[in-house]
Image (cartoon, rainbow, N blue to C red):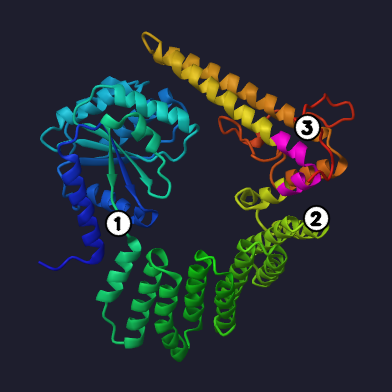
Amino acid sequence: MSAKNPTENAISELEISWLERTENSAARVIVWRVPASGESLLNGFFALQQHPEGRSLADLFITLDTPFETGYGYSEALANDFLESVEATPDARPWTGEAFLPCFSAAALCAMLADFARVHAEDFTTLIVILKPAAVSDIAAYQRWLAQWLAAPAERVRLLLTDTTEQPLWQPLIDAHAPHVLLLNDTPDAMQVMQQTARQQTDPDSDRLLFRRYLADAMLLLEKGSAAQVASRAALAMPIAQRRGWADQEALLHHLVAGAWLKAKNTPQAVAHYQQAQSAAARVADVPVRGQLAVQGAFGEAGAWFADKNYTEAAKHYRRAATLAREIPHPLFELEGCRMAGFALWQAGHRTVAMEDYAAAVRAAHAIAQEERGQTTLPLVFADLLRMQDKHRSEALEAAAARFQQESQRLLLEAETAVSTLNPATAAAVKQVDRRLQLRLEAAFLALRQQREALIAQGDESFRQTVRLARDLLHPHWNGLPDVAHPFDAPPGEWHALPAWRANAPSAPLSETAGSNNV
């Protein structure tokens, strides 16, 4: 029997943790929390248990990424997705899951899954449903659905949620339902696994072997050690890279050390290493790689100055990063360099010059496909410009969006309450409630748009011109951040026509009097 590699060892430790902590637990929901650096290993554990040849536990794991919109809709969609996964399983035992449809509640879904577990009692001990929704319309509504699941009786069925030590998303659920929610805390570390793997590797080229080991050590120390320790380990690798002419790896090492010093809030050291990274990048023979490394180095140096609140110096290097990106060319990096140069100068109080950099960011965006611009930082460019031109009016646009979100949450709760009181909860009755919800959400959405249009209409010409430009480059209905999409994902082309901007536009209330250049 061959020895396990470091990855296999890490996954085995997760398996042991699961066996030791879940076997005698009566929890209905399990939250598995790991550091962000360990998420890949946890997902590897799940993938292995769901593979016919990799399964080692008596429990049956299944992952569902069904998006959440409403509680009743989620229950129905989960039931359908689960049935599809069962039907796609070869040689599955006969089971009449369709008899439980439609499932409009967590309790109904729970009953269906419990029946599946009963019929397949010889095949597994407990059904573990890993929920990883692709999208969640409202986290509060999702929490309510989970609470309903916890209140439903079930045997041999558990839900499994994951979060990270850095972002413990499910802590409120744990606090509210402590007896029924089990928290598993584990600390798998992909960086440590990489280090262990590097140490086990063999290579006839001793330089490559040593370099990989030193690099793995430095990367682990970046997470767990001090900046001085990172620098010391990188110093062992640096002569190898220099002797072998690995200029790209030399640049990588300097970036690593710079990041460690930046984390330690030592700006001079961070800047020095970012500068050395750029010097190394200039010696890279591969032109595309040389260009990418040069841009990264300029961004790194700029970010170090920005973190130190030296905004004028930061702007200079962000602008240089944009110039280097233009030469590659890389319009996304060019856009971001110009945007950050403008933002830094704005922070420094140089509003007029900042506007020039923001204008350069807008010009850079023209080289990006229109359908991709919304996923860049271009919307932030326009949001900053609006705030620079009229702070209070911009804040009023944001407040209108916040009110819409509150109204959406209220309407969603009303619809879920209405469905929960249906007796019986027939498909026709639920469809009627859902249709009413859709109409009311769309009405709220159109009201939001009208409110925002009135606010924009009463802004000065520069404010309106910024919105027009945003609409040209993003989509024709853009009216500020947050950019509120249609509640049921209708594309902008299907939205109702925009209200016309006109001199006699209805009054748009502001918390304070809006005024241009009110920064």
Q: At label 1, which amino acid type do we have? A: Pro
Q: At label 3, which amino acid type do we have? A: Glu
Judged from the image, the secondary structure of the residue bearing numbered disc 1 is loop
Q: CA distance from mark 2 to mark 3?
A: 22 Å
> What span is colored magenta in the figure?
384-397
Q: Position of residue 494 (x, y in %)?
A: 65, 32
Judged from the image, the secondary structure of the residue bearing numbered disc 3 is loop
Residue under label 3: 512
Residue 205 lies in quadrant: bottom left
Disc 1 packing (10 Å; few <14; some 14–19; many ≥20): many
Split into 4 quadrants, where in the image is the N terminus? bottom left
At horizontal 59% and vertical 19% (from top left) the residue drawn is 440
Q: Is residue 157 left or right of residue 213?
A: left
Q: Position of residue 384 (x, y in %)?
A: 72, 48
Magenta stretch encompasses residue 72: no
> Which of the two labelled residues, at mark 2 and mark 1, occupies the earlier sequence position?
1
Judged from the image, the secondary structure of the residue bearing numbered disc 2 is helix
Magenta stretch encompasses residue 385: yes
At horizontal 16% and vertical 28% (from top left) the residue drawn is 118
At horizontal 41% and vertical 23% (from top left) the residue drawn is 72
Q: Position of residue 206 (x, y in %)?
A: 32, 87
- Which labelled disc corresponds to residue 351? 2
- Which labelled disc corresponds to residue 188? 1
